[in-house]
């Protein structure tokens, strides 16, 4: 790691010749959250909550957004809502405790910390009590990434992986060829060159070096490439036209060079005008619209060893003056290796912010005014007790690369691929049990293990539904469709490996067998105006139904539908009819009918009048009476 330490920390190189159904809105919000674009993600989660769309999930995500934006006043409100949810994961007890510390409610914080410990959580007491660790403690309640082996590492130094159009560009000191005796005195390894691993390559050799004038006999890397793939910025020792530049102390610094793609080769090299022989300019990184170039430098006037800066790239291709990113990002030690993802979020390495070891990788959080307000340590397993650096994120926001000299690697620095632990998607189709045809606009209810509703979905034109769910939870799914029997299925996300991103639960509904009321068997009962109580004359028919169900037709299953006349407001009549349905159901159950024999009891208000008395014509009280009724639908004999 000495080579990289020198590049990062000293920035001088002593050269030696001897380096819908699920909401599309939720998908968009989750995508922004995965890319650490918390301001915009929070706006969408708020919208989901207002629409009552998977509200519990949206509240959890919104609470995290506010926490990461260093807004404990808002985060504590939403974490409180989360811990009040049934079966809330225990890590939210810890997050709530941290948020309470953020608003200086220490007594309540200690109570929730105890709840977390009682639920099986483990904490570092000393770490918890540091107010400065509020955000990182919340982010790192559980790992967010898994790591994959990268097969193109060597026994030397490999880092700064950058993917473009399926090709992975990276810096490596693996070349032991013609210049075997030309090594870097700091670590006695060959100098760094830039290599390309094409998408289908199985081996990386000397032939894999980037084509053109990029590589020299000294150090090159890292790099960044424009969207159109025609412009490349890269770091190199101060070496051009076979002349090695040196500062007043006889040391060679780093500079940023710009190259243009010409007939498949990188040529027409030119220095950026803000280079300086007296100090290093390195680690170039373009933002998404290519209006800014970020870099690392130890130029005078910074906060410490090395700081992160940017310059504006003007429309005519010229550059503005270097701008320091300020004290939220830079410390009195070393910040380096900036990277900007496609949502404009900055990632960088630092040994000045609190971390797990030497260099750690951080992400910077902005407020709605685009001002840096906070940083988050990416935690284990991205960070270790050694140096972790050169972070790169693909456009999907879920995967990418970084480098580390942690124990267990092949060389002095190794490249690691990471994958964000993906959200679990619950999906399926609702179909007719007899014909297998998809049921459009069927209602799918997601419930927790205590049968409490989480959210409601409507199937699309293909009978399809989908929704994101938490891992390690038990659920019930109930599907409903008019003229079909309801069906409830249990499912679980427990024990599902992290490489699985979706589970499928298909539901088939049986059509109701009898839709016509057998009037000769089950007669309607009637109600007084604006009342829902069972009348004395109705008990005769109800008792007869009880006898039929208990003694004559022991397998008969019914449903109850209640109605009102057209007088009164429609919302009021909906409530009144529900009360009539409930009163009818309660009577039958009290008389000994098993609840499983009644599939549903439902009020329809004034929607299903039995005559034309809809308020547009004059009707007698007897005609209105015919509408104030409960009917019994035989589902199964």
Image (cartoon, grey):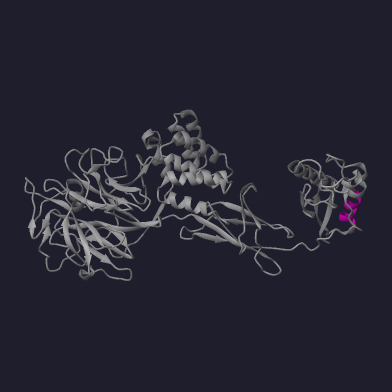
Q: Can residue 325 be seen here?
A: yes
Residue 191 % position (x, y): 15, 59
89 on left or right of 125: right
**Res 196 → quadrant:** bottom left
- The foreground one among 630 and 501 is 630
Q: Is residue 432 left or right of residue 11?
A: right
194 shown above or below 135: below
Q: How many marks?
A: 0
Does the magenta run of residues contain 402? Answer: no
Percent x, y for residue 476? 63, 53
What residue appears at the point 8 percent right and 53 percent down from the top-left corner?
245
- Looking at the picture, tell me which residue is in the foreground, 345 or 620: 620
Q: Position of residue 23 (x, y in %)?
A: 54, 53
Tell me if 417 is positioned left or right of 234 in this view: right
* Residue drawn at point x = 64 percent, y = 46 percent: 452
Q: Up-down: is 574 above or below 241?
A: above
Q: Nearer the viewer, residue 146 or 300?
A: 300
User: Image quadrant of residue 437?
Assistant: bottom right
Q: Magenta stretch mostly in which secondary structure?
A: helix
Q: Residue at x 77, y 45 (%)?
A: 578
Q: Residue furthest front?
A: 617
Q: Can residue 18 be seen in the rendering of this structure?
A: no
Task: Write the start and end of the magenta stretch as one range.
Answer: 543-551
Position of residue 598 measured from the top left corner of the image (x, y, whole percent): 79, 53
| Quadrant in the picture for the C terminus | bottom right
């Amino acid at each position: 790691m000495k080579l990289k330490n020198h590049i990062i920390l000293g920035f001088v190189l002593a050269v030696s010749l001897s380096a819908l159904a699920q909401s599309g809105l939720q998908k968009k919000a989750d995508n922004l959250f995965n890319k650490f674009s918390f301001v915009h993600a929070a706006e969408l989660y708020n919208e989901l909550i207002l629409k009552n769309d998977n509200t519990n999930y949206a509240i959890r995500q919104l609470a995290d957004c506010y926490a990461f934006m260093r807004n404990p006043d808002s985060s504590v409100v939403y974490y409180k809502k989360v811990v009040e949810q049934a079966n809330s994961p225990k890590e939210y007890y810890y997050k709530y405790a941290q948020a309470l510390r953020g608003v200086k409610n220490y007594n309540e914080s200690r109570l929730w910390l105890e709840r977390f410990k009682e639920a099986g959580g483990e904490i570092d007491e000393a770490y918890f009590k540091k107010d400065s660790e509020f955000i990182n403690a919340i982010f790192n309640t559980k790992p967010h990434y898994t790591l994959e082996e990268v097969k193109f590492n060597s026994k030397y130094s490999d880092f700064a992986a950058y993917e473009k159009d399926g090709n992975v560009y990276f810096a490596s000191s693996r070349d032991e060829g013609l210049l075997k005796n030309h090594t870097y005195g700091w670590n006695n390894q060959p100098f760094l060159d830039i290599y390309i691993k094409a998408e289908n390559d199985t081996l990386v050799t000397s032939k894999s070096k980037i084509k053109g004038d990029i590589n020299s006999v000294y150090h090159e890397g890292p790099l960044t490439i424009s969207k159109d793939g025609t412009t490349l910025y890269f770091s190199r020792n101060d070496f051009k036209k076979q002349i090695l530049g040196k500062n007043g102390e006889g040391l060679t610094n780093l500079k940023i060079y710009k190259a243009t793609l010409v007939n498949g080769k990188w040529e027409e090299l030119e220095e950026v005008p803000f280079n300086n022989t007296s100090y290093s300019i390195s680690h170039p990184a373009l933002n998404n619209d290519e209006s800014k170039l970020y870099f690392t430098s130890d130029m005078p006037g910074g906060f410490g060893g090395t700081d992160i800066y940017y310059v504006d790239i003007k429309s005519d291709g010229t550059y503005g003056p270097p701008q320091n990113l300020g004290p939220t990002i830079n410390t009195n030690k070393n910040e380096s290796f900036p990277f900007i993802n496609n949502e404009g979020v900055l990632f960088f390495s630092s040994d000045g912010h609190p971390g797990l070891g030497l260099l750690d990788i951080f992400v910077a959080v902005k407020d709605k005014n685009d001002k840096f307000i906070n940083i988050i340590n990416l935690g284990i397993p991205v960070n270790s007790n050694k140096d972790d650096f050169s972070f790169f994120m693909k456009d999907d926001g879920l995967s990418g690369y970084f480098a580390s000299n942690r124990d267990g690697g092949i060389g002095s620095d190794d490249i690691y691929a990471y994958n964000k632990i993906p959200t679990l998607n619950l999906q399926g189709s609702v179909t007719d049990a007899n014909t297998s045809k998809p049921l459009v606009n069927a209602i799918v209810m997601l419930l927790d293990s205590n049968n409490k509703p989480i959210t409601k979905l409507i199937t699309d034109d293909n009978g399809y539904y989908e929704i994101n769910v938490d891992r390690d939870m038990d659920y019930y799914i109930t599907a409903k469709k008019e003229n079909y029997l309801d069906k409830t299925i249990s499912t679980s996300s427990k024990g599902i490996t992290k490489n699985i991103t979706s589970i499928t639960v298909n539901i088939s509904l049986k059509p109701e067998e009898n839709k016509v009321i057998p009037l000769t068997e089950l007669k309607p009962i009637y109600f007084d105006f604006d009342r829902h109580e069972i009348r004395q004359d109705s008990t005769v028919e109800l008792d007869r139904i009880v006898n039929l169900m208990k003694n004559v037709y022991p397998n008969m299953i019914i449903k109850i539908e209640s109605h009102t006349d057209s007088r009164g407001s429609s919302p009021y009549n909906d409530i009144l009819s529900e009360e009539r349905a409930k009163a009818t159901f309660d009577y039958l159950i009290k008389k000994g009918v098993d609840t499983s024999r009644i599939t549903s009891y439902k009020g329809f208000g004034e929607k299903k009048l039995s005559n034309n008395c809809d308020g547009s014509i004059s009707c007698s009280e007897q005609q209105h009476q015919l509408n104030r009724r409960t009917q019994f639908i035989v589902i199964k004999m």
